[in-house]
């Protein structure tokens, strides 16, 4: 009888800055940076299904995959993220400034883990961008309930292997997949990109 699996927690969020070679288009990723305090992640698929009818049937169906969009709620956006992802700058007095002329959004890989009763699943999304968050605050009413911050994220596909023309959106691995144990253990040491596929 198959195990009854459920999922119930998000943790181990990381980002790794994406660098793109302007001449060749090849990409590389920096060392992943841990971000504590993930509260929730809600991603919606971005894509359409086009159905062509002929002979009284669905003659041709085409699925378009444009990645995902959604919100990442966390306890607090770290100063490192504000500098690396949101392009805020700090002066010699450590004051952090938001600048209007930031140009194109910073691209990065986004990794995290979803726990479950039998296994945990780890993810890397390969081309992510973030919008600057709004500012919210409210008064304390009897107890100090933490107030969270939310980043709106967009995930697109990326050609992560120069020898492969396909654009990969994400990779995922469950902890109970024996063949991937070594990869799972080192998942957040570096961005995991496609390796050798079975033939």
Image (cartoon, rainbow, N blue to C red):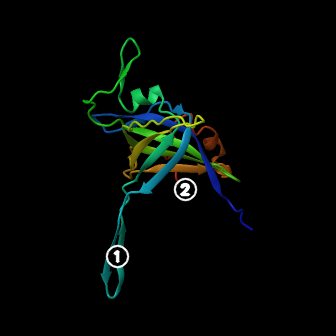
Disc 2: which residue: 198
| Residue 144 left/right relative to 47 | right
In the rendered image, which quarter is residue 99 located in? top left
Between 148 and 12, the residue placed more toward the observer is 148
Disc 1: which residue: 60
Q: Residue 58 in the image: x percent, y percent?
A: 36, 80
Q: Quadrant of the N terminus?
A: bottom right
| Residue 97 left/right relative to 171 | left
Between 35 and 187, the residue placed more toward the observer is 35
Residue 76 against residue 95 in the figure, above or below:
below
In the rendered image, which quarter is residue 184 located in? top right
Q: Secondary structure at mark 1?
A: strand
Q: Image point 47% across, 44% down: which residue?
A: 72
Between 70 and 95, the residue placed more toward the observer is 95
- The number of numbered badges drawn on the structure is 2
Q: Residue 146 in the image: x percent, y percent?
A: 55, 36
Residue 43 against residue 88 in the figure, above or below:
below
Residue furthest to the front: 142
Q: Residue 112 in the image: x percent, y percent?
A: 55, 43
Q: Are marks 2 and 1 in contact (CB under 8 Å)?
A: no
Q: Secondary structure at mark 2?
A: loop
């Amino acid at each position: 009888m198959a195990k009854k699996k459920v999922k119930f927690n998000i943790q181990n969020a990381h980002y790794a800055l994406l660098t793109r070679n302007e001449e060749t288009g090849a990409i590389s990723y920096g060392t992943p940076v841990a971000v504590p305090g993930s509260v929730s992640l809600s991603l919606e698929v971005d894509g359409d299904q086009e159905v062509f009818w002929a002979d009284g049937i669905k003659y041709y169906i085409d699925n378009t995959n444009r990645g995902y969009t959604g919100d990442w709620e966390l306890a607090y956006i770290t100063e490192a993220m504000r500098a690396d992802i949101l392009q805020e700058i700090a002066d010699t007095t450590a004051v952090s400034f938001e600048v209007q002329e930031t140009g194109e959004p910073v691209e990065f890989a986004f990794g995290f883990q979803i726990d479950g009763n039998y296994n945990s699943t780890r993810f890397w999304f390969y081309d992510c961008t973030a919008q600057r968050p709004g500012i919210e605050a409210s008064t304390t009413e009897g107890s100090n309930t933490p107030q969270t911050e939310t980043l709106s994220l967009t995930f697109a596909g990326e050609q992560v292997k120069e020898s492969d023309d396909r654009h990969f959106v994400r990779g995922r691995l469950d902890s109970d997949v024996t063949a991937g144990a070594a990869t799972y253990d080192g998942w957040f040491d570096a961005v995991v990109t496609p390796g050798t596929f079975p033939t």
